[in-house]
């Protein structure tokens, strides 16, 4: 790990009243739900803890989590009293004198740590819980912090659903000439808000503009990669399930054992995808909770094949849909055989002949033996897509400070993309794509298309 | 010898395949990484791979597929040489007369068809056409041999070896690398076949005397005359001697039999021999050589452009470990541990009623709580503390008039802090009876045990008896004894 080019990382003190969400903000920025302690009781953090935000292994921001202010009014009075007894050149000197006499102010042990850190930091992030009323003690906090002579950036936390309160707080901060403020909800996370935080720091710390820009670019790249990786993982899940086919003997309906085997396959595939998605976004399995039935040991407990699931996602639950089984479609030369057909027409005796035989050998053998194929039905594949799209949306809008468990059933977007069934149909014609990842050009095109649906804002919501 | 980027990536990918089934958490992984240099993720991955390979002694295991592939390739090349030699021998050794066009068909016909198919595959990007049968066979053999092999190793290492082989095949024989690798192999095998054919043909022509002839049953003679003229055009340009139309006619089987060309047979033999060898060079070996060069260049390019799929969860997780977005907490200014109110809850209140002459003071109520309450007489309301000024005013009133019973109303939903405690302690210091009223917005508002315990602790610190802590719902505005 290295320090940035200017030799000194930017020191950022995260300050504010107790329980305003200082530790939560840092957790979200670090993508680490294990950082610090979060509790509803005041004074949970009683120490100063340092962590660093890196840009490609380079230490750019040193974040200092500080104890919360608990009695700023008394502190301000003590400072005012001290200012009458000592001669100090500036407000910052007064704070230094106060810190030097810490033993005389034992009640302010926590606040003195905040002051000490504020004096040696480049910028102060003042965290505000906008749900709090506008009380005098908060004004006192700003007044005390401004004595440190460092740029202050108010950060409005818990803003979701509190727009009126937010407006009042903005006006309140404007009275202290703190017009540059940031809306950053540590629970209902938005990556754009994180970017705005660094951009605000750029305007406050002009000399560090370039290194902050490189940090913004790096974080954006990483965020895009995570989203893309997650979307691709969902596509792979869809592909592996849509491509599933199992040869079943006889012409009669599928046996319970055959259907159970198929269902186990689908469940297992989805569980693996769930684990991968949580890994991608650095969430632990404990974060996940599904409405009605919680996830246990990192596994979906709301069964994919339960009728409630189909109903929740607005899919028409037909008789077969409950089991998720469907008879395999025939060989669709118009879809799956496009490339092979083209090759055959060219008279490719060796290569194409080989590929064609390999592609259809199982179907041909099954047809000769009088067997049929068991596939996963369209409703189940669609349900998988909708459920995992919703999960992705939840994961990308969840701060690492969120204390409530993850619910994926809220605000379900039930609309399937326009070309959805065409894509599924093409996937069904390529059972060989179960062996992932495929380098097939057609597979890559489908992957790009579905990934595009998932990462675009329109479909994710 | 410096290892190429592709070979590094290949070994990293082999480890990925193995780790998908056998986690290989190396001891002291971070020790393997050199954090002093500003290295990219690729380099970190390679450092980690080297570390794991060394720790688990994987060098031989990871190189096995490449070794087997080399053996198979050598075997295939030998086979191609034999086929080429046999082709020449079969076409010319049955008699002292060589059927020119039959020999050309044996040596060049299939080669030209194969080249045409390969070019079609490249142009239309059809995988099945870019990899010929022989090349496909060589890619299939290692996997097949692997499954048949009986390696005297532990089960885990055997499985790891199979996974490594599978990764090697996936990297070497799929995507652009695979396409050009196949292409290169295809051209190499045909070159071996053609060179062997040419060599044995030259050998035979040097030590034996052959007459050249051609004939047809279905086609007219002019077809072969025209064909020879067409083939001669590039040969003439390159300076090879080629037969004229008349000389072609003289070599027809019927003409030879009639003894028409006997006087010119030596010259004709030499001419046809040159034509034959030049055709092999010009239409067989040279284009294959060019295509092989092209494939080699494209193969090197494909290897250079080869990228690991960093979108895979495996690499995402590794990136988070090897290239963390943040370094995590270090306490630099320690403090006393917080008091855990939940583990030491204050005693529960008993039923009690507020006295009639109580004076009310609210402390830092939220915006959603209107003060004074409708049930509080205006004369009994001393106001709400919201800042230092209101606090000073109320304190002044308390000093001016001694009130024996003081009730402090607070919002039960808000966490009590040291400032609130100091404020309440100051307000109730002169009172004979002290009450703490926990206001709730409505009866069903949930207040956690922890929050409740914190208020009781505050009451205790302010000398408010536990049975004087009561709750009041704003919807009812009647004092209840349930807290």
Image (cartoon, grey):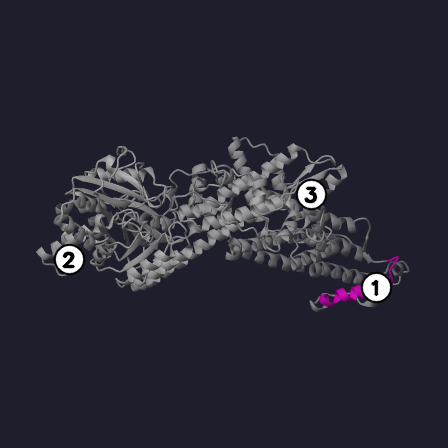
Local crowd size for mark 2, using a 10 Å CA cut-off: few (<14), some (14–19), many (≥20):
some
Local crowd size for mark 3, using a 10 Å CA cut-off: few (<14), some (14–19), many (≥20):
some
Asked if disc 3 and disc 1 are in contact, CB closer than 8 Å, the reply is: no
What residue is at 54 percent from the left and 39 percent from the top?
B163
Q: Is residue B229 magenta?
A: yes
Question: Compared with residue A263, is residue B252 higher up or lower down, i.e. above or below?
Answer: below
Dot 2: what SS? helix
Q: Position of residue B115 (x, y in %)?
A: 69, 57
Along the line of sight, the residue nearer the viewer: A151 or A444? A151
Residue segment shown in magenta: B216-235
Residue named by callout 3: A328
Residue named by callout 2: A93
Q: Position of residue A300 (x, y in %)?
A: 51, 39
The residues tagged by marks 2 and 1 sit, at their Cα atoms, a distance apart of 107 Å
Asked if disc 2 and disc 1 are in contact, CB closer than 8 Å, the reply is: no
To the question of a shared chain for discs 3 and 1, the answer is no
Local crowd size for mark 1, using a 10 Å CA cut-off: few (<14), some (14–19), many (≥20):
few
Asked if disc 2 and disc 3 are in contact, CB closer than 8 Å, the reply is: no
Residue named by callout 1: B223
Q: Position of residue B195 (x, y in %)?
A: 67, 53
Q: Give the main secondary structure of the magenta stretch.
A: helix
What residue is at 62 percent from the left and 39 percent from the top?
A322
Q: Chain of mark 1?
A: B
The residues tagged by marks 2 and 3 sit, at their Cα atoms, a distance apart of 80 Å
């Amino acid at each position: 790990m290295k320090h940035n080019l200017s030799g000194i990382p930017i020191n950022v003190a995260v300050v504010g009243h107790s329980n305003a969400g200082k530790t939560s903000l840092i957790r979200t920025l670090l993508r680490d739900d294990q950082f610090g302690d979060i509790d509803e009781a005041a004074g949970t953090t009683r120490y100063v803890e340092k962590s660093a935000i890196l840009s490609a292994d380079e230490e750019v921001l040193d974040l200092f989590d500080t104890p919360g202010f608990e009695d700023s009014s008394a502190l301000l009075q003590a400072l005012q009293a001290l200012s009458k007894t000592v001669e100090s050149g500036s407000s910052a000197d007064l704070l230094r004198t106060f810190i030097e006499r810490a033993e005389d102010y034992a009640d302010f042990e926590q606040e003195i740590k905040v002051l000490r850190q504020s004096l040696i930091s480049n910028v102060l992030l003042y965290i505000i819980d906008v749900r709090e009323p506008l009380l005098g003690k908060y004004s006192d906090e700003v007044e005390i912090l401004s004595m440190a002579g460092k740029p202050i950036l108010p950060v409005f936390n818990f803003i979701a659903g509190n727009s009126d309160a937010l407006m009042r707080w903005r006006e309140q901060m404007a009275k202290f000439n703190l017009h540059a403020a940031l809306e950053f909800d540590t629970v209902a996370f938005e990556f754009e808000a994180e970017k705005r935080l660094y951009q605000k720091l750029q305007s406050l710390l002009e000399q560090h503009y370039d290194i902050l820009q490189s940090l913004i670019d790096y974080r954006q790249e990483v965020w895009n990669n995570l989203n893309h990786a997650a979307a691709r993982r969902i596509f792979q899940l869809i592909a592996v399930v849509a491509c599933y086919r199992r040869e079943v003997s006889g012409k009669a309906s599928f046996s319970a054992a055959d259907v159970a085997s198929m269902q186990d396959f689908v469940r297992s595939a989805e569980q693996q995808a769930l684990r991968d998605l949580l890994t991608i976004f650095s969430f632990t399995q404990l974060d996940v909770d599904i409405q009605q039935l919680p996830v246990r040991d990192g596994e979906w407990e709301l069964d994919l094949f339960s009728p409630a699931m189909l109903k929740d996602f607005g899919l028409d639950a037909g008789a077969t849909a409950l089991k998720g089984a469907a008879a395999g479609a025939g060989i669709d030369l118009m879809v799956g055989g496009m490339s092979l057909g083209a090759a055959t027409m060219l008279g490719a005796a060796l290569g194409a002949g080989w590929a064609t035989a390999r592609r259809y050998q199982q179907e041909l053998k099954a047809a000769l033996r009088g067997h049929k194929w068991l596939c996963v039905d369209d409703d189940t594949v669609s349900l998988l897509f909708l459920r995992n799209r919703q999960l992705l949306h939840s994961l990308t809008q969840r701060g690492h400070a969120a204390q409530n468990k993850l619910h994926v059933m809220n605000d379900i977007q039930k609309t399937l993309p326009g070309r959805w069934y065409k894509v599924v149909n093409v996937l069904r014609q390529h059972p060989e794509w179960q062996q992932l990842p495929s380098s097939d050009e057609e597979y890559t095109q489908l992957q790009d298309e579905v990934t595009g649906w998932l990462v675009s804002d329109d479909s994710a919501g | 010898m410096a290892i190429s980027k592709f070979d590094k990536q290949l070994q990293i990918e082999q480890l990925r395949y193995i780790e998908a089934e056998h986690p290989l958490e190396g001891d002291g992984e971070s020790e393997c990484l050199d954090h002093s240099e500003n290295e990219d993720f690729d380099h970190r991955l390679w450092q980690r791979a080297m570390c794991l390979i060394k720790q688990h002694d994987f060098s031989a295991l990871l190189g096995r597929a490449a070794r087997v592939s080399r053996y198979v390739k050598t075997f295939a090349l030998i086979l191609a040489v034999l086929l080429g030699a046999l082709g020449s021998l079969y076409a010319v050794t049955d008699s002292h007369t060589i059927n020119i066009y039959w020999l050309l068909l044996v040596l060049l016909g299939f080669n030209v068809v194969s080249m045409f198919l390969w070019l079609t595959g490249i142009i239309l990007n059809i995988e099945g056409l870019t990899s010929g049968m022989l090349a496909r066979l060589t890619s299939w053999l290692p996997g097949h041999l692997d499954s048949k092999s009986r390696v005297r190793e532990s089960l885990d290492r055997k499985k790891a070896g199979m996974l490594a082989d599978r990764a090697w095949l996936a990297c070497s024989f799929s995507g652009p690398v695979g396409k050009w690798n196949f292409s290169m192999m295809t051209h190499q095998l045909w070159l071996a076949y053609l060179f062997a054919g040419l060599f044995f043909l030259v050998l035979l022509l040097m030590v034996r005397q052959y007459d050249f002839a051609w004939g047809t049953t279905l086609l007219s003679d002019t077809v072969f005359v025209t064909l020879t003229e067409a083939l001669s055009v590039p040969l003439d340009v390159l300076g090879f001697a080629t037969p004229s139309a008349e000389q072609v006619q003289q070599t027809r089987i019927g003409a030879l039999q009639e003894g028409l060309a006997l006087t010119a047979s030596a010259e004709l033999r030499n001419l046809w021999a040159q034509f034959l060898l030049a055709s092999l060079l010009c239409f067989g070996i040279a284009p294959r050589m060019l295509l092989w060069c092209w494939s080699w260049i494209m193969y090197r390019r494909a290897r250079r452009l080869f990228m690991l799929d960093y979108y895979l969860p495996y690499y995402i997780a590794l990136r988070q470990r090897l290239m963390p977005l943040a370094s995590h907490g270090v306490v630099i200014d320690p403090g006393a541990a917080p008091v855990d109110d939940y583990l030491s809850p204050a005693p529960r209140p008993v039923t009690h009623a507020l006295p009639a002459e109580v004076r009310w003071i609210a402390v830092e109520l939220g915006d959603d709580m209107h003060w004074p309450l409708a049930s509080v007489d205006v004369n009994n309301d001393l106001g709400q503390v919201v800042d230092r000024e209101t606090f000073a005013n109320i304190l002044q009133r308390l000093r001016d008039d001694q009130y024996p019973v003081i009730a402090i109303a607070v919002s039960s939903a808000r966490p009590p802090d040291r400032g609130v405690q100091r404020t309440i302690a100051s307000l109730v210091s002169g009172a004979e009876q002290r009450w703490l009223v926990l206001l709730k917005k409505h009866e069903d508002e949930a207040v956690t045990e922890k929050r409740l315990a914190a208020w009781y602790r505050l009451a205790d610190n302010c000398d408010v008896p536990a049975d004087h802590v009561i709750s009041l719902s704003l919807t009812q505005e009647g004092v209840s004894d349930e807290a």
